[in-house]
């Protein structure tokens, strides 16, 4: 329970910090530079970090995976911010999915036409 509360607090604080960086000077804030570059750049950076996370997961050093996981979460939150998607929307989607099995949830998704 305590770990969950701490995790929620860390994510909430990071979301607030990212949002606040919209008003920070671009020359001192990497987050501001990403936000100013727009959704395309943020999406590419998130993708790069996701690949690095996969590579770290295949390695033998747990600390590398921890670091890359932190990077991918940060870049995901920046991507959500630049697109105007609230973290709470993601949490709501996850909460709904937790109410049914993963197999049933995937089956219920609308599949795009070929």
Image (spheres, rainbow, N blue to C red):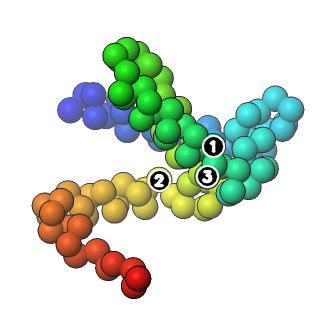
Q: Is residue 46 visible?
A: yes
Residue 39 against residue 42 in the figure, above or below: below
Position of the N terminus by quadrant: top left
Specify the farthest residue to the bottom: 113
- Element carrying mark 3: helix
Q: Residues within 10 Å of mark 3 (few under 14, many from 20)?
A: some
**Between marks 1 and 2, how big is the CA–CA gap?**
19 Å
Counting from the top left corner in percent of width and height, residue 41 is at 70, 50
Counting from the top left corner in percent of width and height, residue 49 is at 54, 37
Residue 43, numbered circle: 3
Q: Which residue is mark 1?
A: 45
Q: Which residue is mark 2?
A: 87
The mark lying in front, picked from 3 and 2, is 3
Q: Is residue 10 visible?
A: no
Position of the C terminus by quadrant: bottom left
Residue 113, numbered circle: none
Q: Are marks 3 and 2 in contact (CB under 8 Å)?
A: no
């Amino acid at each position: 329970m305590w770990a969950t509360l701490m995790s929620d607090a860390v994510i909430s604080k990071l979301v607030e910090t990212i949002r606040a960086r919209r008003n920070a000077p671009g020359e001192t804030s990497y987050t501001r530079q990403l936000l100013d570059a727009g959704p395309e750049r943020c999406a590419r950076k998130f993708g790069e970090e996701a690949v690095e996370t996969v590579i770290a997961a295949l390695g033998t050093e747990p600390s590398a995976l921890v670091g890359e996981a932190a990077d991918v979460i940060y870049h995901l939150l920046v991507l959500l911010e630049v697109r105007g998607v609230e973290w709470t929307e993601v949490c709501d989607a996850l909460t709904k999915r937790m109410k049914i099995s993963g197999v049933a949830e995937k089956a219920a998704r609308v599949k795009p036409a070929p």
